[in-house]
Amino acid sequence: MSEFLYLFRGGDRLSSPAEMQQHMQRWVVWIKELSEKGHVKQPGNPLEPTGKVVQGRQRTVVDGPFAEAKDLVGGYLLVHAKDLAHAVEISMGCPILETGGAVEVRPIMQK
């Protein structure tokens, strides 16, 4: 098994607390199913929408991240899968896709 990082990007804002709660429950169920199948290497967490960006040779620090909402990374998950195609297949059940978001699937480089 290889390791992959799922980066969760974007997604529409949900309009009501009840809708948000239902959506979060779908996340809980999806991650639990992945865990039971042995795919979750390390549980991830949602990320705060603010932070700092350190950039360039001068190590300039600025508020951020600044990107369009659809491009912001909102959370992550480390998973095990046979290969990249399998990792992509597993990601198809992610609840963020229901709200127009995206899952970026990245292989973890082996040392």
Image (cartoon, helix red, strand yellow):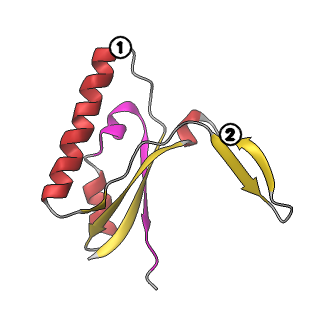
Left or right of 60 in this view: 68: left
Q: Is residue 15 magenta?
A: no
Left or right of 86 in this view: 44: right
Where residue 80 sits, quadrant-wise, is bottom left
Residue 48 x %, y %? 52, 38
Q: Is residue 102 magenta?
A: yes
Residue 8 x %, y %? 43, 46
Report the residue at 26% width, 69% height from top. 81
Dot 2 or dot 1: first in sequence order is 1
Q: Which mark, residue 16?
A: 1
Instruction: Estimate how packed mark 2 is, as few (under 14), some (14 to 19) or many (20 or more) residues with alpha carbons within 10 Å.
Output: some
Q: Which residues are magenta?
A: 94-109
31 in relation to 17, above or below = below
Question: Looking at the image, how many numbered discs can be counted on the residues?
Answer: 2
Report the residue at 70% width, 50% height from top. 53
Report the residue at 31% width, 63% height from top. 79
Q: Which mark, residue 66?
A: 2
Report the residue at 65% width, 40% height from top. 67
Quadrant where the N terminus lies? bottom left
Q: Residue furthest left?
A: 36
